[in-house]
Image: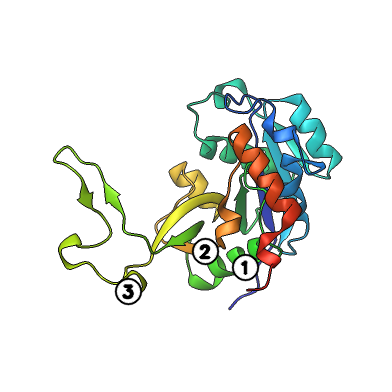
């Protein structure tokens, strides 16, 4: 396998949040929420630079305080309905305009996912690189029996309910958890999307899949960070 070149971490963080105002800078167990993603990127050896893109000066100030570089997101990329992929491309091109070399991989970190275990980002980058993929997303596994409502009524989505398997024999499905994405820079430029033609999956622990979007989730995540239940031996 060829050596991995330096990667660029981009953390998009809008100022507007309806469910939890100012969530990206709220103190979560003593640190602003966005700091968790910045610090996770800083401890990842494959990542050379970290850029936070935001339309909010408070977020940008906090990000600079934790060692990230910042890009001001223009108003046309700041609405509720704007997908972060456009903000990623804008930040990448701004980064290149600073005279920086093209990164081998762009690592998209969601600031609302503070629980990433040490080594997770590095392992995800290495999997994307070794698999020959042009993009990767983080997922959580589920062995549950999934159903879906359709116009014709509910259907068993992940198994045949007429030949119900034992739970441990059920298919292993994956849920996109939104924690991290890895992509070649050209994927963003040619598709305006985080996914390319060859996609890899990086399975994370169930703890790493939790996100913060509501006050209740904020309290729950703070409890997890304080108690670290994943460290309890079975």
**Residue at (42% x, 59% y) in the render:** 174
Judged from this view, the residue extending furthest toward the top is 75
| Closer-to-camera residue (70/144) | 144
List x then y, in percent, for residue 127: 55, 69
From the image, tell me which residue sits under label 1.
123
Q: Nearer the viewer, mark 3 or mark 2?
A: 3
From the image, tell me which residue sits under label 3.
169
**Residue at (76% x, 44% y) in the render:** 35
From the image, tell me which residue sits under label 2.
202
List x then y, in percent, for residue 104: 62, 59
Where 110 sits versus 122, above or below?
above
In which quarter of the view is residue 206 placed? bottom right
The local secondary structure at tag 1 comes to helix
| Closer-to-camera residue (140/137) | 140
- Determine whether, in the image, residue 68 is placed left or right of residue 24: right
- Counting other residues with Cα less than 10 Å from the Cα at mark 2, is it few (<14), some (14-19), or many (20 or more)? many
Identify the mark nearer the N-term, 1 or 2.
Answer: 1
The total of numbered circles placed on residues is 3
Identify the mark nearer the N-term, 3 or 2.
Answer: 3
Q: Are marks 1 and 2 in contact (CB under 8 Å)?
A: yes
The local secondary structure at tag 3 comes to helix
Q: How far apart, in angstroms, are the residues tagged by discs 1 and 2?
A: 8 Å
Where 162 sits versus 21, above or below?
below
> Would residue 101 be visible to someone looking at this image?
no
Where 43 sits versus 58, above or below?
below
In which quarter of the view is residue 229 placed? bottom right
**Residue at (76% x, 52% y) in the render:** 226
- Counting other residues with Cα less than 10 Å from the Cα at mark 1, is it few (<14), some (14-19), or many (20 or more)? some
């Amino acid at each position: 396998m060829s050596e991995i070149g330096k990667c660029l971490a981009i953390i998009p963080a809008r100022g507007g949040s309806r469910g939890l105002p100012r969530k990206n800078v709220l103190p979560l167990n003593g640190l602003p929420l966005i700091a968790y993603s910045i610090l996770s990127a800083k401890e990842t050896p494959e990542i050379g630079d970290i850029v936070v893109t935001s339309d909010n000066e408070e977020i940008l100030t906090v990000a600079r305080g934790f060692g990230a570089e910042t890009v001001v997101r223009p108003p046309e990329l700041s609405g509720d309905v704007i997908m972060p992929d456009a903000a990623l491309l804008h930040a990448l091109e701004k980064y290149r305009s600073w005279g920086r070399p093209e990164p081998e991989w762009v690592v998209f970190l969601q600031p609302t996912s503070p629980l990433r275990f040490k080594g997770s980002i590095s392992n995800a980058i290495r999997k994307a690189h070794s698999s020959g993929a042009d993009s990767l997303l983080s997922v959580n596994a589920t062995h549950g029996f999934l159903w879906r409502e359709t116009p014709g009524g509910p259907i068993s989505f992940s198994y045949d309910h007429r030949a119900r398997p034992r739970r441990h024999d059920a298919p292993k499905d994956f849920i996109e958890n939104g924690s991290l994405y890895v992509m070649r820079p050209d994927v963003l430029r040619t598709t305006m999307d985080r996914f390319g033609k060859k996609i890899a999956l990086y399975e994370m622990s169930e703890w790493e899949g939790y996100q913060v979007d509501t006050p209740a989730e904020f309290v729950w995540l703070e409890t997890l960070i304080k108690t670290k239940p994943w460290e309890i031996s079975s």
